[in-house]
Amino acid sequence: MTEPPLLLPEAKEDVANAFLWYEHQTMGLGMEFMRCVETALLAIQRTPLIYPIALDSYRRSLVRRFPFAIFFEFEATLNCCVVYSVFHCSQDPDKWRSRLPT
């Protein structure tokens, strides 16, 4: 097992914005979204290398029940995953790609 995933500020903002949006739609739905994201992050922490590579060394995990994908990279030197984006799948993919280090 690796260290807990490290969410970059932009990824934290993605989660916070989605939480607020879902909670505004239906009371409690935002909390269900949070539970599903936390479940996905725990699975990433347990076995990060089982997820498919989306681009170069960046991997993708889908969030159960919600149209979101978590884009991350396993950093062997840190023994953890760095999460770059918690991305709504209907958005332009260039948005999450623009967050990757050059």
Image: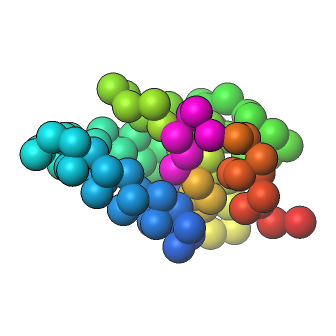
Q: Residue at x 10, y 46 (%)?
A: 27
**Residue 12, picture quadrant:** bottom left
**Residue 98, picture quadrant:** bottom right
Quick one: 85 or 95, which is closer to the camera? 95
Q: Viewed as shown, does residue 82 lie left or right of 55? A: left
Quadrant where the image shows the C terminus? bottom right
- Spot occupied by residue 49 in the image (x, y as percentages of width and height): 63, 38
Q: Residue at x 68, y 60 (%)?
A: 75
Task: Note whether 21 is above or below 33 in the view shown.
Answer: below
- Spot occupied by residue 17 in the image (x, y as percentages of width and height): 39, 59
The answer to whether residue 31 of the structure is visible from this angle is: yes
Q: How many marks?
A: 0
Q: Residue at x 27, y 45 (%)?
A: 22
- Spot occupied by residue 19 in the image (x, y as percentages of width and height): 30, 53
- The residue segment tinted magenta is 86-91
Which residue is the extreme one toward the front?
25
The answer to whether residue 61 of the structure is visible from this angle is: no
Instruction: Say if the magenta span includes residue 25.
Output: no
Which residue is the extreme one toward the left?
27
